[in-house]
Every structure is written in C-alpha cells, then in structure tokens.
Amino acid sequence: MARLGIVATPLCLFAASPRASAHANADIGGFYQGLGTVFMHWNVLLLCVAAGLWIAQHPLPRWPKLGTTLIASFGAGFMLAMVGAHVLMPELVSSSAFTIAGLLAAMQAIQLPRLNLGLAAAIGAMSGLALSTLELNTLQQPLLFISGTLTGAGMLVFYIVAAVSRLPAGWPWIGVRIVGSWIAAVGLMVCAYSWQALE
Amino acid sequence: MRDGYRYALHGLRGVLLLAVICGGDVALAHTAHMSGHGFSAGFSHPIFGYDHLLAMLAVGIWGAFLGAPAIWALPVTFPLVMAFGAVLGIGGVWLPGAEWVIALSVLSLGAAIALAARPPLVFAAVLVGLFAIFHGYAHGRELPEDSSALLFAIGFVLATGLIHLLGIGIGLMVRLPNGVALLRLGGVAIAAAGCWLGFQLAA
C-alpha cells in the first residue's frame, strides 16, 4: 500500500500540474481549487486528520476498506448535492462529522468491522454533503473540484495512517488518542456555537 | 536520577513553548494582521485566567502523582469534559455558583497535591470531570464578538491541552530526589491561591 502511495501521489500531482495541463485542452484550475480546499477548510482538514488517526488504530487489512469507504462516501455526498440534495445547517453537520471522527480516534478502536464501515460512510457523506452545500453554487468546474478534493482528502488520510502506524507503542499512541480527543472537543464547541448562531 | 532531570527538562521546554506562543500573540497585537483573531482569543482565554491556569496545571501534576492509567486517561478525557461544560455555557444552561466551584477546584486540587492524595481512579476522574465542566462552562459563555467560532475553539482546546501537558511534565518531577517535596510545596501554593480566590469572591 505504501508503494502504491509513492507511485500514485506524484502521478496525481503530475497529471494535474500546470505543465501537464498546458499541453491539454482543458483548464483544470478547479482540480487545484479542490485540492487546496482540503487544507484550507478547517472542517475538512480536521475530519481527515481525525479519520486518519482512527483508521490507523485498526489492523492493517482493514485500512483500505475503511479509507475507501470514507473517501467514496465523501464523494457520494458531493454527488447527492449535485442532484439537488442539501443540508439545512452545513456548518453544524460538518462539525458533527469531525466530532464523531475525533471521538472514534480518542476511544480505542472498536473491533466491529460493519459498524466501523457504517461510521466511516456516515462521517464521509455528512462532510461531503455539508462541504458541497457550502461551496457548490460558487464553482465553475464542480467535477474537477470534486476530484481534486477527493484526491487531497485521500492522500492526507493515507499519509496520516501511514505515519501513525509506524509510531512505537506507548506514549506516541497515547498522543494519538489525545489529539483525537482535542479534535472532538473542538467539534463539540463548534457544534454548540453553530447551533447558537441559528437560534 | 538522569530520567528525572530529562523529564524536568521536558517541563521547562513546555514552559518555553507556552512563552513563545503567548509572546507571539502579544507581538501580533502590534501588527495589522488580524486573521488569527479567533485563535489568539481562544488561546489566551485559559492562559490569562489564572484560576483556570492553576486548576489545569494542578490536574496535570496530580495525574502524574497518581501514575498510570490516570496520567494518560486524564488528558484524553479532560478536554472532552471541559468542552461539554463549554457547550452548556454556550447553550445558556444555568449552573449555580460556577465561580465558587472554580475557586473550590483550585483549592481542592492544590490540597490533593499537597497531601499527595492517591484516591481510587474513579473518584479522581469524577472530581476532575466535575471541575472541568464548571471551567468549560465559564469559558463557553465568552466567545468574543467578530471571532471565528472554529478558530476560537481550536485555540481554547489547544491551550487547555498544552497547560495540562505542562502540568504532567512538571508532575514528572516526582522522579527527582526531592521532587515530591517540591511538588507538595507547589500544591500548598496552589491551595493558598484557591483560598485567596474564595476570599475575593466573598469580599
């Protein structure tokens, strides 16, 4: 999986680079906009970090399933928004998604594979739907934006999983749970502030 | 003994880190960049409220005194419980005598360190959790105008966690030859500060 990442990452970046796009007919600025959204949008960034910390706590064979489910449901959330679905309180939904991911990272991984897959799908879809409700109307190239966002989110989650899984046992793993609890605490507060702003 | 010095050095590094971050905040106040307004407001909240600062330091020190699993269970649960308290404050739930409980928390946690108390983990966790709710409640009601809620929350939780970790770093002085006596002396000072807070409220 690490080898695949080493090959896939430069390939994705090269395919989307200005140099490559200069030789094509399409303007793919939307892809970079989507890629940047993952790092500029705090809600998505915190979701990816928390999800990476959570997925890394599972045994190695379950990583691809969980990671793929998360990213696929994230994309499904976008697609739902493109066909007209939207959420009423996107900030609240988005914050709830990374709160749940943070809580999952703070608790030791629950060994219930189907439940974990369901949770990964739920937080991915919530976040995708909330982000697209916020952003989709302002986009000129939504499909490129979505592919950029999914690539960025996938790479970030993958790298975090890879980095965390190499940590030695003991304090570093306690640190992983502490960071998860901090993300969940931030999420709880943001949910409350979003709720208060609606009233 | 070498381990003790190493842990004390880690504590000192934590203090320096906090000083650099706070110093950066002060420096930012003299520039035109206001993009981090919410973050700096949230970050400075737990640091410049000395009642909160003392209580959170005391929780970390006490956690180190209690040893495993309290030393790692408390930093995982404390920010979450404190955030829950903040949610109560934001939601407008009325908690009676919050300031009194905060003063009591400083006094009790200081006393626990001074007496080197080692109660069962459940008792310590419930006590710390109760105090964390009141501390979070007091902070949650105070989101400044024109601040980003998310950046404020990130700053607030980060500062809380760092102070807590700093407390644990200081608490690891128990491994030094005279560390326990020094920490118990520190506990007396924290408890005295708690008494002073109580007198101020009564006056």
Image (cartoon, rainbow, N blue to C red):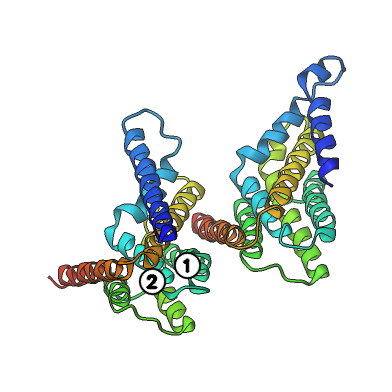
- Would residue B133 be seen by someone viewing this image from the given angle? no
Q: Nearer the viewer, residue A118 or A140?
A: A118
Name the mark nearer the viewer: 2 or 1.
Answer: 2
| Neighbour tally class for label 1: few under 14, some 14-19, many 20 plus, Cα within 10 Å | many
Which chain does tag 1 point to?
B
Q: In this view, does A108 lie above or below A69?
A: below
Q: Is residue B70 above or below residue A54?
A: below
Coordinates of residue B75 in the picture (x, y in percent): 49, 65
Residue B36 horizontal side relative to residue A26, left or right: left
Q: Which residue is drawn at 76% across and 54% down?
A: A125
Q: Residue at x 80, y 43 (%)?
A: A82
Give the label on residue B62, or none. Answer: 2
**In the rendered structure, which amino acid carries the disc numbered 2?**
Trp
Give the label on residue B78, or none. Answer: 1
Secondary structure beneath dot 2 equals: helix
**Could you say which quadrant of the image residue A69 lies in?**
bottom right
